[in-house]
Amino acid sequence: MRVLITGGAGFIGSHLAEALSSLHEVAILDNLSTGRRENVPPDIPLYEIDLRDKEALQAHFAKHEYDVVFHLAAQADVRTSVDSPIEDAHTNVIGTLHLLDALKNKPTWLIFSSTGGAIYGEKSTFPLSESECPFPESPYGIAKLAGELYIHAFSTAYQVPYTILRLANVYGPRQNPHGEAGVIAIFSYRLLTGQPVYIYGDGEQTRDFIYVEDVVSAFLSVLGMPQRTYGQVFNVGTGVQTSVNQLYRLIAAAVGVEQEPTYLPPKVGELRRNALSAAKLHAATGWQPRYTLTEGVQRTVESFRKSLQLLNP
Ligand SMILES: NC(=O)c1ccc[n+]([C@@H]2O[C@H](COP(=O)([O-])OP(=O)(O)OC[C@H]3O[C@@H](n4cnc5c(N)ncnc54)[C@H](O)[C@@H]3O)[C@@H](O)[C@H]2O)c1
């Protein structure tokens, strides 16, 4: 199959590109804002295009045909979206609309990477299923929900086939440890380099952490079952809540340090708890996560340790 991955130079997209490249003809579209050329295997074409540039997108799709587009390109940081909601919407809403416009009346299957961490808002019963009413609180979550609704509208009006995956908190090798998002990457990097680690609030807030290879296998399971997944929304998570304090202890043990974290005032608007039920995806494709948090954290810490050793042999 001819496959395009938007955002394929980023964290999740580059793992997906690696997994797909042995089986399919893969290309990547990315503006390299947070993604990196080094993440892209050299044999995969990388088209440096910005989703906000409607004409460039139209020109690309006039020249290239794809069976499947995995749409992962996004401003993917919740805190950045709170600081700059308009910039967030330019990529996550208008950029997604530009892509949909370019795919109008084509048979290309759009598989969209949405969020299960930010779309539901504050809830009280876990794990959350897809039937839970979304009530996002951050501009990022609002933009992702708008993207989902636009995709549904384009599917009705212009026959764009689609599947939506709402991902929990994804972690693993190559996640950026220098931004605001990606707590496992940040803690691992800071502990490995002897820097203080900050926890906002009391650290009892929970998240559903899922290893990147499990997310890739969720995307692949959907790709293998079009008739069962077209027009559907699926959560991709483990169903398990882990507090930031528990996570800190796991990472400190994997790094081998006894350092204590520093607690700072909570960030405004941060969710208290989250975990996603992936029962619907399991029923449709048989997918389930393979990695425990302990295994995933060990793999992540080891990969950061190796890249630091390469930088400072
Ligand atoms: N990491 C998570 O925990 C998580 C959770 C839920 C959903 N998601 C979603 O998964 C996708 C991938 O996230 P990630 O963690 O790999 O983030 P990332 O920042 O590593 O990847 C995003 C990629 O999109 C590219 N990009 C950004 N703006 C663009 C634009 N205007 N035009 C073209 N390319 C652009 C970036 O350069 C980058 O390569 C995103 O859609 C994100 O919202 C991520």
Image (tube, grey):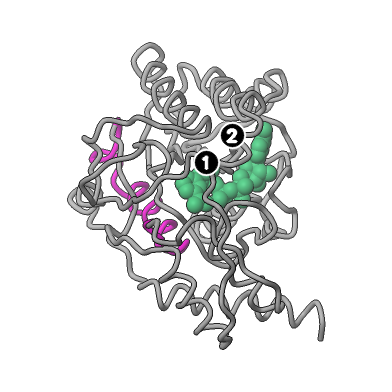
Q: Residues within 10 Å of mark 2 (few under 14, many from 20)?
A: some
Q: Give the Cα distance between marks 1 and 2.
A: 10 Å
Indicate left or right for 41 with 263 as reference.
Answer: right
The amino acid marked with disc number 2 is: Val
- The answer to whether residue 79 is visible is yes
Secondary structure of the magenta portion, mostly?
helix
Residue 306 occupies quadrant: bottom right
Residue 276 painted magenta: no
Q: Which residue lies most toward the top here? A: 157
Q: Residue 197, how many percent across, how many down? A: 62, 68
Q: Which residue is mark 2?
A: 82
Q: Residues within 10 Å of mark 1 (few under 14, many from 20)?
A: few
Q: Are marks 1 and 2 in contact (CB under 8 Å)?
A: yes
Q: Residue 133 shows which numbered tag?
A: none
Sooner in the amino-acid sequence: mark 1 or mark 2: 2
* x, y percent for residue 107: 43, 26
Residue 1 seen from this side:
no
Residue at 47%, 36% (x, y): give it.
67
Image quadrant of ligand 1 equals: top right
User: What residue does disc 1 label?
Assistant: 268
Q: Which residues are magenta?
A: 207-231
